[in-house]
Image: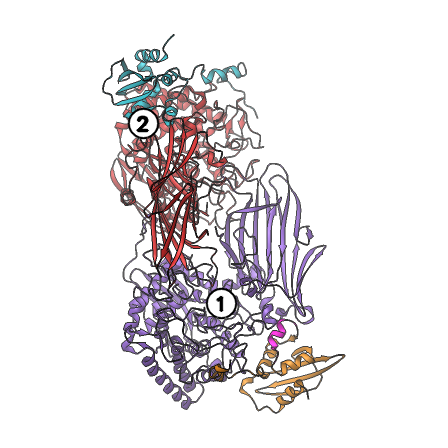
Amino acid sequence: MTKPLVSILDGNTFVVSDNRGDIDPSPTFPTGLFSFDTRFLSKWELTVDGNRLNVLSVDDLQYFESQFFLVPGEPTHYVDAKLSIIRHRTVGGSFVEELTVLNHEDQPVEVTVRLNVESDFADLFEIKDVREKVGGTTVVVEEDRLRLYYQRETFRREAIVTSTAPAEFDRHGVTFALRIGAHQQWQTRLRVETLVEGAGGRDIRLSIQRHQSRSPEELREDLDAWLARAPKLSSDSEPLTETYQRSLIDLAALRYAPLTAGPPLPAAGLPWFMTMFGRDSLITCLQSLPFTPELAGPTLRFLALAQGVTLDDFREREPGKILHEVRYGESTAFEEQPHSPYYGSADSTPLFVILLDEYERWTGDTELVKALEHEARAALNWIDRYGDLMGNGYVWFERRNLRNGLENQCWKDSWDGISYSDGRLPAFPRATCELQGYAYDAKMRGARLARLFWQDPVYAERLEREAAELKRRFNRDFWVEDGEYYALALDTEGGQVDALSSNIGHLLWSGIVDDDRAGKVAEHLLGPRLFSGWGVRTLAEGEGRYNPIGYHVGTVWPFDNSLIAWGLRRYGFRHEAGQIAEAMIAAGRYFGGRLPEAFAGYDRALTKYPVQYPTACSPQAWSTGTPMLLIRTLLGLDPHGEHLVVDPALPVGMGRMELLDIPGRWGLIDAFGRGRAEHSRTPPGLME
Amino acid sequence: MADPTAEFFSRIEEHGPDLLPAKARGRLRFDLDRDGEVEHWFVAVNQGNVLVSREKREADCVVATEKELFDKLATGEAQVLAAYNRNDLTVRGNLPLLLVFRRAFPSPPGTRDPRERIRERFAGRRVAGERERRP
Amino acid sequence: MNDLVSILDGNTFMLSDSTGDVEPSPNYPSGLFAWDTRFLSRWVLTINGERLHELSIDDLQYFECRFFLVPGEPTHYVDAKTSVIRQRSLAGAFEEELTVLNHRDEPVVLTLRMEIDSDFADVFDARESRSLPGRTAKLVEPGRLRLCHERHRHVAETIVTSSEPAEIDADGLTFRIELGAHGRWSTTLRAIGTIQGAGGRDVRENLRGYQEAWPEKRRELREWLDQAPKLTCDSETLDDAYQRSLVDLAALQYIGLTSQVKLMATGLPWYMTLFGRHSLVTGFQTLPFIPQIARSALWVLALLQGGRVDDFRDEEPGKIMHEIRYGEPGGFGDSPYTTYYGAADCTPLFVVLLDEYERWTGDAETVRLLEYEARSALAWIDTYGNLMDDGYVWYERRSPSGLENQGWKDSWNSVTYADGRLPGNPRATCELQGYAYDAKVRGARLARTFWNDPAYADRLEQEAADLRDRFNRDFWIADQGYYALALDAEGGQVDALASNMGHLLWSGIVDDSRAEQVAEVLLDRHLFSGWGIRTLARDQAFYNPVGYHTGAIWPSDNSLIALGLRRYGFAEQAARLAVAMVEASGYFGGRMPEAFAGYDRRRTKYPVQYPRACSPHCSSAGTTLVLLRTLLGLRPHQDHLTIDPAIPERLGRIELVGIPGRWGRTDAFGRGRVHLEPE
Amino acid sequence: MDPTTEFFEALNHRAPDPLLGKIRGTVRFELESGTDIDTWLLVFSAGSVSATQTDRAADCTVRTDREYFNRIAAGEANPFAALLRNRLTVEGKLFLFSYLNRLVPGTPGAHEPRDWVRGRGQR
């Protein structure tokens, strides 16, 4: 039986344990205390008189705080536990665990409480495929602390364990020999400090104000302030309000401060992606602009600062290119992994321009648009120069880092993400359809920026001309005549990679779809092959590689669906957009309002609940942004000049929706909407 | 030697009303097998009154078991439901009627009134009703 | 039991791990059980020798659920190429439909195997898994696997068949299957358990409802829900709890082997059989909603009323049964539980329910027909119940394997002095005296109104009044300001502070002058955790927040206390208790367990689970219904229903439509007006 | 002249570069070789940058050994990776250090992506 996992996080420092609170190395899922892509605790195992404990219940108090109620031995009916243990933990810079042992007996007891502690200092990359460490780990037992450190040349990471109550430390953990009086309790606070060594043996991260260890109180205040700034949603649909609240909190949880920039940015997802991803961050910011615009500015600045200026094959870096991923672990530090940073994605560059424009439309922050003119132009140039590998006006990708670069440099980046209808894989380079959509949108938006803020009408016209040509060419080359949808990609011979996929939904969002074809596209998206009833599948049922539990070839991705709904709305398919929103919100309900990275593509008719995708990342930034974009879509929010246009289209049964204090260039404004029919609840026993 | 089964039936014919609910009514037949030879006991219960005969007549509830076991039931050594659960006693027809009739079976031999034991144990320790309050 | 998955149908249930597999465990009775006998103790699915892992579980109905599985340990980024859907249902027989999906673009050959075994253990032996006397055989027959256990004339059998051809061996079924690209394959496995009765037939054959197919069940469930009053309220939590409770009450019904009427199984997994106490309490709780539950409880318990003195079964004439078991050990006299009578509270409660039942339904016929049994019950109170000849109800077990404590708190350590000492036997716990008092008062009404015996009525009322006086003299601890938990054999006060006192309010034996003090103590922080009232106060020697009867919180206990508070006019306190319970139920998906831990609410965000508590449990399900009754202040008054709502503001509007009773059907409506501080 | 000196000298002949945006600030480099340490001072002022060997305090100090900085200056080593493994340390304003990424050359022999695609034959 796979035990449920419990995680708490504060930016890219996080703890994942089993539901007893124990950490035990597992190859399939990273449990441990992690910070900056390094595992600082690989074992954190509590025993009482040598026995593991069993969980009665788990309180998830805050994203950075949880509490476990435990008893010794396997719980059995009718036999009462004489002891119980409460394990209260928080993470905020450092990891603090408060242990309380309660004696329920009428006489004193003597117990030995022990924590087994180990660290393998694994780089996150080494957890998926374990390998021999090059450096060495040293354990130092001191009077009042246990120090574990790892050294490889100048690279040094250290974990320091201390306890407020007297303890015996040894090489493998810490022991407390206790005598607890009748109905008394014993308590200690264990603290685990992590050290990423930099100048003068001090922690590199000290330069980041945000990194300083923060108390639960500070974190709580910070969270309250964050929630107070966000628009207030009130709605008849409990699942919707639930998922909105959850999303706001998760997005707060995922904020982290990279080494080089001040204000926090959204990390991509727990546990595999607790770092900056160009694509994920840009899309999350697009989704959340109407709600938490404070993320977009810093994200744009950071990505601009890290924009490529020179060529580098190992890192797939090119001038003007926006990064794919930054990592801070050992394998990156020693240039075995290319993530310092890695640039292997073809979509983050156009998306950078798109966000910059959308950001200005909402916030009116012309300063930033002017400040980043050079970077925006460099990005637009990249599209035509380095993106256009085949010199035929499309954006292509092919990796130059053959060791550990990504094969597919679009959002569906698993090896089998791009295939023909019959399942064959096309040769490289590949030009996926959504990339062309993004490029088109980037040019159109770039034109607006050039005209309004860069005083360069000539450049603006040129961009618009190029965009128009691209759209014409695209509708000629990508349209699959007999299937009446857009091909997933073009291959090097200009042939159509003809699988039917969710990517066509992004085309609507970008506006590259010819108006007379939009209807067909919408039909496909909501048709039985793509729409599972819980959402649009990444790949249509019946395609060669379709697999309802395939990462990019059949599962349903919430963020994907949010962009599709937005696109449908853009082309006036109000009802269809509502259908997708309804499905997502309904699905969210079964994940406690927290939409995961992805879930299985089985037909809704077949499953009462959306089926989990094995070990999907959760929370995941752009899944967190999904409910927000859906709300924007349902209410039809769009900035026009200095005003916010509201044009609600709520599905039947969603009832009333009210979004108050939407921030933007207009100050704060409210939006209202109402679904036509009231929704009725079925008793739990009778759900079909 | 005496036949516990026969004694049992003659006793309930006499004391039926004290043993059975006033409103109890119905006809039971007990088919008791002694090495292949079956003897029948027919019992008609009406307003608690009991008429016993040895006829093999139609009944609402027919109970089949071994004579040997029934002798044990008749003396209280065995219990009806336990016998039924282990399939040593089978029933056709109106099972609830047997449950009503169950009240007629005696206690296990040597059973005493629980209150007597208590009285002995606490003899002289206390007089009912009068109790000194302890702080 | 968060990591276990159960489906049930009356006293038949299947309890497996979260992948649907069954392996014997010492800590809980996993497997397919019916009539207290385990018919499947092993039911493990493998593909090419590999165990499966769950993606998710759909609980479709109480009698059917579905597992989505993949072979091997699921990992990120590596897509499973096969998935398995395992859909099971219980309706008489156990059926499991296995569907294997091939997600590859090419054909694949797989070996699917179901490992099968049965130890035919009694539900209690399942704990110690000791092997039964008698012989067990595994017979491989054409098209089926037959497992049988034989002990003397007692024969239990499990027969497993498959709709698709299988290779059958003594330890299970094997399928070698070939699936096309994206193909699917499926088979339906059927396991039937039988116990041989008259003429080798399944003793359960003649029972109505047994062997129903599940579409039939679905229809029955709809009808059941349609009969119950409709609730509309602002609180989704309350609504969930109400719906869940109605469904669980339906789920727990089974048809009695001997009585052949619908009975209430008590709690999954340990108590899937009739308990006198719980069916009486549940009958009482559900009267305003589903009166037939009370009706069948009264009838079956009357039928099984004690008829003789039997020390092994703690049986006495007129005594109402504690518990009935159908397992083999009972049959062979290894255990007294075939029909066990070791309970001192069931007998008075029987009379209490009979009267309450008539007040709601006006079914005088039943009251007349059960006169004899009711009188025998009342007689028991003064004779066998009155062990010390002092007019109180006492208990002391005579059966070596009987229960030490024969009140509702029946674990060994549940009756103690404040300092933790255990009193000697016999013991007279306070709530028993309350029940006896109430039984006499109600019995008097029945005698006068229906049995035409005013003399008897007068006598009962006289006795009740005396009892009330005596009780308030002997049980009241003046310096503490609460009632003793019990009296010991010397007449000393067993002075632990426990929830039992709340029942005294429900029975009406408390002097009006003391009611206020009692209510205060009940809602004081030592007893009231913020989620509910603890079985034992926080400052008592034996207190243990995870102690079954020494600190845990029992919903059913709280429901009777709420009724008691209402009876004495403490509407606000009752509302406070009710809303706490409702909020707790929210964390159990509306399904209140048998009990949960007694930690202070300030300390826990969620109510903490009691280890392996029974769930669903009939009188916990009944509790939600009592909470509604309490909040709306429902009381039958001759031929009318009186309504007197006391609803906390944060529960908002409550509307209960179609409340059945002697008045036909009527509605109740109330709005949140009581202001309470958050706990 | 070693790569380090070349690198810094070249900065002085560099035309004002939009890459540097509007940043102002000073970065001090301490490059030790054996016993002696030679220092360089970068001065960013509104789009232009100058490098001198003056020895004075700055907003941000970068320390490593000369031999390793030669590799950075030649585009062979990655400054950010060096920071992560503590091969190079930074004190003061980290964001100024990150502009170093914009000044150092690309990796020697890196391919123009289009050439890479065309040149597939050779691989």
Residue that label 2 marks: C198
Q: Is residue D78 magenta?
A: yes
> Do the residues under discs 2 and 1 have CB atoms within 8 angstroms?
no
The range drawn in magenta is D76-86
Decide if residue C433 is in sight here.
no
The Cα–Cα distance between marks 2 and 1, rounded to whole angstroms, is 69 Å
Residue that label 1 marks: A268
Where on the picture, by quarter, is residue B28?
top left
Q: Residue furthest right?
A: D35
Where on the picture, by quarter, is residue C157?
top left
Q: Is residue C357 above or below residue A634?
A: above
What shade has chain B been given?
cyan
The residue tagged with tag 1: helix, strand or loop?
A: loop
What shade has chain D been given?
orange
Is residue C79 or residue C580 the one in the foreground? Answer: C79
Q: Amino acid at mark 1?
A: Ala
Decide if residue A108 is in sight here.
yes
What shade has chain C been given?
red
